Amino acid sequence: MSADERAELERLRAQTTAGGRWARAGRWTAACALLLVAALLGVLAVTAVYLKSEVLDTETYVQTVTPLAENTAVREALANRLTDEIVTQTDVAGLASQVAKRLVAEGAPTRVIDLVGPAVSGLTSFLHDQIYKLLGTTEFQDIWEQVNRLAHSAVVTVLTGRQGQVLKSSGTTVTIDLGALLSAAKQQLVAEGMTFVSRVPDVSIKYELVDSTKLPTVRTYTRILDSAGTWLPFAAIAILIAGVLAAPNRRRGLLTGVVMLGLAAALMLGGLALARTYYLDHLPSSVRSPAAAAAVVDAILRYLIAALQTLLVVAAVFVVGTLLAGPSRPAHALRRLVNRGLDAAGRGLAHAGSWVSAVGRTLAGARGVIQIVLVLAGVVGLILANRPGVAAVLWTTLAVLVLCAIMEIFIRGARAVTA
């Protein structure tokens, strides 16, 4: 080459290298943007699924609040509230004062009036103890569950505009059919011997509870929540896959995405912890039992916290997997050890017959696709499962690894047969 030709070659090489560097940087920028969106959507998806199940699924809500009936702090708070209500409504102090004054008027010592306070305190303490014992019975726990189920069913009816057995919601109104209550009361009275009540006919008695123009807006938000809880998880997965495919190095792209997802889940957990602490530290003065309030908050949030912890473990599993697939020395050493074990198992399987070779060749042609399908099936299974926990994540990971190992054993068995 002449000097001019070599200079032109070097110039073209420099342009090509610069263009490739800018293209690579652009792909990484787009990939990181997609992965960040996927991480944020992943955390929002977990929250949306949790809210959807708590707001729109009565059985899930009942499972959430049922343990509160056995909580000591909640029982104590309920016993205090019910005792105060009984003492206030029956005016125990007033009745005791009247009795004491009457006794004094009839010749009793005036010191009888001084005994009114201790007597009322003793009666209040006795009522509290009896109510506290009652709240610990299975009968009360059944009542607690039934009341919460009925209340939540009514809320779902209002939010969704459905037609319940007693409560009906449509347009801007919420109505209750008192006729159903009349029929139930009539049956109870007849069972107690008041047969003349059976002459009362079964009628529909419509009573309007709410008439608000905001109800359609509330129902719209409810439908949005329902859709978000259904589709956000799959949207997050789709955007995560797009970000990984856009990255120049897909292994590093996957590692970046799952690290972002894990950080988002960890930040959400930290935010919930701070919000819980702030709320309990700033309770209204009307709340007389901070321990009961803490128990209620913990019961309501425990499934959301468990879901975020599960998401964090999923991210950790993918981080470990991508690191073990990398070029580091520990990863190479571990893969070498695993390959030796798979090769040995494949040679042992090769003695089973020629069918091993046929199965192995078939699997070898679709190895990559099968691996991707197994991983996606595990992720989708966790999404569709009812509140999968950390144990479910670990078992699913183990199942995917075992299936991939079996496929590898057949592929290596086919190679051994051919050899």
Image (cartoon, rainbow, N blue to C red):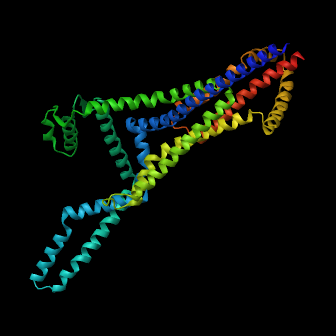
- Residue 112, by quadrant, is bottom left
- Residue 212 as seen in the image, left or right of residue 416: left
In the rendered view, tell whether residue 154 sits above or below residue 360: below
Residue name at image x 43 percent, y 36 percent: 53
- Residue 127 as seen in the image, left or right of residue 322: left
Residue name at image x 65 percent, y 25 percent: 22
- Residue 196, by quadrant, is top left
Residue 352 locus on image (x, y percent): 84, 20
Residue name at image x 64 percent, y 26 percent: 247
In the rendered view, tell whether residue 148 sits above or below residue 4: below
- Residue 277 as seen in the image, left or right of residue 364: left
Residue 336 locus on image (x, y percent): 83, 33
Q: Is residue 370 visible?
A: no
Residue 81 locus on image (x, y percent): 30, 60
Q: Residue furthest right?
A: 419
The quadrant of the image that shows the C terminus is top right
Q: Residue furthest left?
A: 105
- Residue 167 as seen in the image, left or right of residue 110: right
Q: Nearer the viewer, residue 64 or 21?
A: 21
Residue 95 locus on image (x, y percent): 16, 70
The quadrant of the image that shows the N terminus is top right
In the rendered view, tell whether residue 122 sits above or below residue 398: below
Q: Is residue 289 visible?
A: yes
Residue name at image x 48 percent, y 34 percent: 45
